[in-house]
């Protein structure tokens, strides 16, 4: 049986998810809701689906699930509306920037018995999945120390920074989730340092652009995360996990797999420069995983609780920057 | 305006091309011809196209071009039939195993003014295209020496070997085309060595499994090609071009971009093991290039003449193995 | 003119330095002092030098400089004795485990106008020097974020741990010095996390085996350091420096520069497993730098103050582990 | 007991061997013979040895072995003189450029029962030794196909080319020896192509600068060798051996093991640019192997016959270039 899906929001990421839905066997894109008429028509033309209002979709009998790609401040309300309407929900992270609002939302979802998956795309990257599989296969023994390196090629627009909740909530949130996914236990202590090194305006807007964090779990496992909003050589995305019997690392993806040698040395192309290009397969995989979980009735691979936990780590990191102290999240 | 395409032959490679046609903007898959009813229905179900007989397609007003994926011994006839019928033709290599037949076919195509592209997929691999772009950008100066390494993970079925024309015509044919593409001038001398090292049965069938070739052009550029029908670590596909100011190389594609370190050393996964997985993007790119050449009226990126030239190199290599002498192709 | 050098202490590291002295043009090994008669004789046999008592060497007219390789708790006294005696001094780190004692020692050295170099060998590793040269050449712009990874193949003997001052003072001390060398400004904040993950006995001895540190400077530059006392794949020694225009990294040294590909993937040998093998060139280079500084009268490349600063960072890290707080060193 | 060695010829390579002799335990450099007084004195000063005439050395009771580093056209005579005088001989390759002269020389050596090692340094390179060990350990199964890549950074002086016997005898001779060492059986067929691409003057002198060779053995193993006299990026020295169960490759040595990433991509330093730097350890190892073979009375690791066989392959390659035919060596 085909899972009938509607997309809420046809912006940049909405289009990515529409394409994923269209390509996943067992799923069909039946409708899109989008206030910008032009964008909505484009989706309709490309994927041969209806244009509907959000409330119409909530009431549609021919929609089994929705993919929420609207602005962040609408996420919690839409999650509540659609789970209450009996639709399965895939929502782009975050649920909300406010931890209390996230908690209420998750309680409401739980009350309805609704099914919610949160869009932490990195867990679905093929290289990161291979890294995780190597750990699960016992290739490195017991996980002890993790190093996550995430560097954006450049900063987002200033107005995004003012709305995003800052670097810990809009950027490191992904690393917090990856850390939890790989540590296999909850973090009990967060130590963070933060600076403004690339653009003073970022500081004036109340944010940082260069941050390091140490996470520690109860059993003493540690994870360091380094983030900056500038990397001349592209979108730098690396994971290294050190265990009792070895290490496993996932390496960067270059624009092409060639090497030039000349009088000045050996040269490889820069990294893929854009998160959508870098994670194009991950985006397709996560929608496929959503569809599969619904079809099989199995647990969602990433849940609302994962979203809450990552947000709590971001809050703890911010508090650690302000106080210098190690902060217990949650 | 949309280019309306039919697929002749819905076997393994036919499906790959059907998918490519369906995904290329500006092209539509309107029909498939395939004697195996089950395979034809599968294509119809997946791509929502008609099932028709080959002659019907040749007579169809709603078909602008065909993609020929039928057995090799039908290629020349179909090319002639469809170019005569005014259809543009994309044909999987080779046109025919017999050089004389290929020459006649190309003459007939020329007489009709028909348009023919030959499926040398490697020219459309993103890494090889980046390598070629580096050369064209002058990054290594003048091309002098080329090293091509192509190793199949394992041999094809015995019955394929008896029909394929042998390793020079079914396997090294790709390398001959890549060599011509990168040398930028025609080959005037072919020296070849051939052995049976992996399976004596291959020898009994009159073929070789391990071959090396040196190609030389009039200006003295040289290209070595090494082929074997066995590589324990996957599908080994490398190009290295040495020039007056440097070198450029295209490297292999591994199953995943991770590395594990343990007491026995550092370990990366094997190579992609199957030519369809390895060249999945190349197959999509070559169909897109076919569509674009038809839309823009520009020259076909790979022509029937390219097919002939590569086949002549294969003949010359065989003759060199038999005589020990350097052989002039053509 | 030849610089006449004596070695104090002919243990493992004493032999390394003796070999370095013997091979550096412009230097000569004239004497060794070593309580173990056998070890002393071995040095005498290999390098054709005298065996003398320490006090004899201090009084020798034919000794211009000494290299101190005796146990840590004798360093400060010997530095004072030999600088007072007018000898130039190269001393293995640390000067002392006690910060106050180090400060007194440095004051005493200063009072005599004596010349003292401290043995931070990593600054003299050819790869790390090339990394530093790339930074100095402006290849990565302004330094912003540094990641230091140092993992020992296995823990030292338990009795060493009880005498060494613990992982921050005996192991990370090298990384603290490298951090200062590359940051180019002093650290103002230290945040540290520490666990016992590899061997509970290490915890019972009051030490840790797995530690992470974030260093921050006044201008906001940050450096993370990760250390563990166990790495299955060898002696893991990496530096990565991220700057405004790019990054530079120094990579590990493997046992051999070969790669094996087989059905299970691609395999390289493990890392060099022993600090003396890994840093054999660095040890030779640092003695050459000592000799050159004395010959030219230029500043010592690593000073007593460098030793003090690194020790202060170790103290601050320990305090941060105990309190959870960010600690200002010094 | 110490092996007492004299060096004949104190040019560039003579100095390298003098240093090797001085550093090998169990060997002592007792004398040097060199017509250039300055060069001889330098060796005497550095290694504290005598200066003697060649005939004096042949008559010296305190010399057990000699290392011949004189011009090529003196090699055969000196080998005969010194083996007749009862000295063990290490001689730089080649014995002579004339195959007949080499054969006579070897017969004369055999008649005296003298011991002769030929300086094929590459067999003693640590990476190549590790590659060979991997093969001997069965890591890749049975050897089937070998690819040798040797590119010099730039051409030798013109007058060297006129005396050297040309690219096959002065440069590829090393690869011929490596091929024999790794193939494990004799070559029965040589096919070669040769061009002048880097400098027309090289052609006017009767030599080539760009050559490819295919070697085939009786059992059908094949080896390709590519040589050029120009590589912008340094001294390119690679081996790849393909076997029934996998492959092993030895990779190049860069000036430093660092990588810089910036807006234009990822950059590593060029290769070591000079054969003496690249093979410094190999030169030391081969002298150590000579001394060890003499001490233990075991077979010489590289013999006069190895020199003859490599020269025969060079002759066969030249003849193949002239005739186009596959040539049987010997």
Image (cartoon, coloured by chain):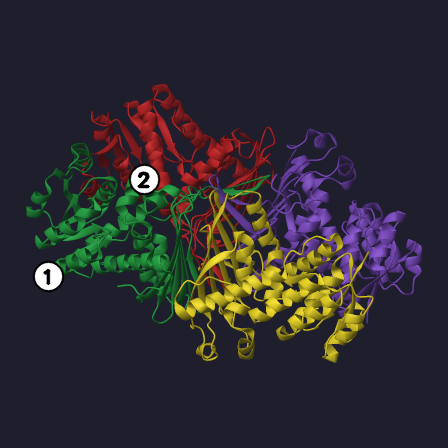
Chain colours: A purple, B yellow, C red, D green
* Residue B260 seen: yes
**Could you tell me residue A80's position as x and y percent?**
86, 55
Look at 49% across and 53% down and name the residue there: B240
C69 sits left or right of B189 in the view: left
Disc 1: host chain: D
Disc 2: host chain: D
Look at 34% across and 30% down and name the residue there: C290
**B273 above or below D121?**
below
**Could you tell me residue D263's position as x and y percent?**
60, 39
Task: For marks 2 and 1, give the CA distance.
Answer: 38 Å
B49 sits left or right of D108 in the view: right
Closer mark to the observer between disc 2 and disc 1: 2
**Could you tell me residue D270's position as x and y percent?**
45, 42
Q: Nearer the viewer, residue D319 or C328?
A: D319
Which residue extends farthest front? B111
**Could you tell me residue C325's position as x and y percent?**
61, 38
| Neighbour tally class for label 1: few under 14, some 14-19, many 20 plus, Cα within 10 Å | few
**Which circle marks residue D111 in the picture?**
1
Q: In which quarter of the view is residue C306 placed?
A: top left
C240 sits left or right of D202 in the view: right
Indicate the secondary structure of the residue bearing disc 2. loop
Q: Which residue is mark 2?
A: D157
Number of dots carrying numbers? 2
Indicate the secondary structure of the residue bearing disc 1. helix
Q: Nearer the viewer, residue C143 or C330?
A: C143
**Which circle marks residue A116 in the picture?**
none
B274 sits left or right of D34 in the view: right
First in sequence, mark 2 or 1: give its number.
1
Q: Are marks 2 and 1 on the same chain?
A: yes
* Residue C14 seen: no
| Neighbour tally class for label 2: few under 14, some 14-19, many 20 plus, Cα within 10 Å | few
């Amino acid at each position: 049986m085909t899972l009938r899906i509607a997309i809420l929001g046809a912006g940049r990421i909405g289009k990515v998810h529409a394409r994923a839905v269209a390509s996943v066997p067992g799923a069909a894109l039946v409708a899109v809701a989008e206030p910008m008429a032009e964008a909505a028509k484009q989706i309709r033309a490309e994927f041969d689906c209806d244009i509907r209002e959000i409330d119409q979709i909530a009431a549609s009998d021919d929609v089994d699930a929705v993919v929420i790609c609207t602005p962040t401040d609408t996420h919690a309300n839409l999650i509540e509306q659609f789970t209450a309407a009996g639709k399965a929900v895939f929502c782009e992270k975050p649920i909300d920037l406010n931890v209390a609002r996230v908690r209420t939302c998750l309680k409401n979802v739980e009350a309805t018995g609704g099914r919610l998956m949160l869009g932490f795309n990195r867990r679905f990257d093929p290289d990161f999945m291979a890294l995780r599989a190597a750990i699960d296969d016992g290739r490195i023994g017991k996980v002890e120390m993790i190093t996550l390196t995430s560097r954006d090629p450049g900063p987002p627009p200033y107005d995004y920074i003012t709305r995003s909740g800052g670097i810990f909530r809009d950027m490191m949130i992904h690393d917090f989730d990856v850390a939890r996914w790989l540590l296999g236990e909850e973090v009990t202590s967060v130590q963070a340092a933060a600076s403004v090194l690339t653009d003073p305006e970022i500081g004036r807007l109340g944010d940082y652009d260069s941050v390091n964090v140490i996470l520690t779990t109860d059993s003493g496992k540690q994870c360091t995360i380094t983030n900056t909003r500038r990397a001349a050589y592209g979108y730098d995305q690396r994971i290294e996990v050190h265990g009792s019997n070895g290490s496993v690392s996932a390496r960067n993806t270059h624009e092409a797999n060639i090497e030039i040698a000349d009088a000045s040395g050996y040269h490889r192309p820069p990294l893929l420069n854009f998160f959508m290009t870098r994670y194009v397969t991950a985006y397709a995989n996560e929608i496929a995983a959503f569809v599969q979980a619904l079809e099989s009735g199995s647990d969602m691979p990433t849940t609302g609780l994962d979203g809450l936990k990552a947000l709590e780590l971001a809050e703890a990191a911010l508090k650690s920057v302000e106080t210098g102290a190690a902060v217990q999240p949650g």
